[in-house]
Amino acid sequence: MDADHLSTLIRRINSSYLELSALMTDPAGMDFDRIRPEFERLEEAAAHKGYIDAAFAYAADRAGAGKYVGAVHPVEYLTRALGLSRAEARSRLQRGEALFAPPKPPPQPEGPAEDEAEEQRRRAAETERLHREHQAQRQARDAARKAASAEKQTMITRELAHLNAHCEPSYQQLLALALAEAQHRGLEDLRTWLRGRIREANRRGRTPEGRKDPFAAARKRRLSIGAQDADGGAHVSMYLDAAGLATLQAALAPGRRPGVNASVPAEEDQRPMPARLVDQLMVVVAAYLSSDSAQTRQGVGSVAVSMTAAELKGLEAADRFPATTGHLLGPGDILRLGAARYDLGVLHDDHGRVLHLGRTRRSASLAQRLALFAQELCCTRPGCTVGAGEADIHHIRSWLAGGGTDIENLTILCRSHHSANRDRRDGAGGLGHMDKDPETGRTGWCPPGGGQLEFNDTEFQQHSAGAKIRRHRGKEDPVSGRPSAG
């Protein structure tokens, strides 16, 4: 690729967009009939960016682009350098892999072939299928370059995730067909068309032994929890195999009856059926969390809420407090969880730091985990909002280098940022490391080339008790994270 030519093209595109935006300062005064055809052409031209985005994401993956932002995974590069959401970053990487990564060989049969002739037949079939995969991928790339918008490509990638491992036609073949159809179908029509083809492909699919895959549904089991909305709730979706469905239905069945899990008599229970099922699910989950297994979970699977003593005394209905799960809970939510007035106290100094709790084993104790939650709330890597309940406890000075399991030497890091921490502190691989600010005691990230620590100042992290105390005491500059001049 000619990098100079690429640079010229991008500068030209950027200049054109700036000129175009300047022309649009007064859209009300424009002759719509005259500009309409041109903007339809602009939309057609913009459709090519979906292909370009996927190609660049694949190149970023191949280059290990996470190293350019002090991380390991290319998702981190796409989110931090390009400002994408994690969902969009993952979508581009998936599309890039589908369009450019060498197709994978078909699944292998379980056990040896019955005879040599059968083995030769199987190998010939593998070779033929792999050839079809390569051909389909080339067709998919051509179709993606021509007309498939980024929105259509994202939808196709999302829908193809429902394919079984042994589907027929294969993933690559269906991708090529879908991208070809995208040239003359609208988004919703394309989605309906593709879902029908996916159902048929899964129905026709057979294992290399020629049998229907009995574990196809189990391989696709999943559960996802969306982000909280303005009311504090979130959408939850899941896919279960038949056994999972039966188990869930049996567990929810008692909650279908009026009056069950309700504070009113059956005849006064006006809850719709979906709400009754949710209430029953919460009863099932609460029973597990309150069972004897809590003794062995060491706090994992428990919900802890952080608030200061002053906040507790002046509690108002609109207040929101962070939990270890990474969610914000209101007073009503906390009451429904059955939280006591003071389940655990964590003592802070006037910098918001948790006081020393003593040295333990290599793994942090439950008390230390709760203390770090109270102090830091979430992953301390700048820009991250993964809650303490889904993160690891990291030794700032590594255990192998003699670092102790003391509260001063511990911090919260999510799995992604934990793997991107360079314990040797030499900046190798473009990776930085976590360290303590000697003045404030706050944990920050040191870039691979050294320099001033960078702190996590996300809106979510500002809900931590440590941040609240620092703000209240006026001990910290909101930008640098260092003590203020006053």
Image (spheres, rainbow, N blue to C red):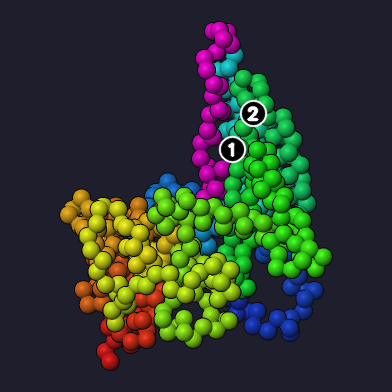
The extreme bottom residue here reads: 486
Kind of residue indicated by mark 1: Arg
Q: Which residue is located at x 56 percent, y 21 percent?
A: 109
Residue 281 is situated, as x and y percent measured from the top left of the image, at 64, 55
Residue matched to label 2: 213
Residue 453 is situated, as x and y percent measured from the top left of the image, at 28, 70
Q: How many marks?
A: 2
Residue 335 left/right relative to 440: right
Residue matched to label 1: 219
Asked whether the residues under the numbered discs 1 and 2 touch, taking CB atoms below 8 Å apart as contact, a structural biologist would say yes
Residue 471 left/right relative to 23: left
Q: Which residue is located at x 26 percent, y 72 percent?
A: 355
The mark nearer the N terminus, 1 or 2, is 2
Kind of residue indicated by mark 2: Asp
Q: Which residue is located at x 54 percent, y 21 percent?
A: 110
Residue 437 is situated, as x and y percent measured from the top left of the image, at 24, 72
Instruction: Give the structural element (helix, strand or loop) at label 1.
Output: helix
Residue 167, compared with residue 122, is above or below; it is below
Label 2 packing within 10 angstroms: few (<14), some (14-19), many (20+): some
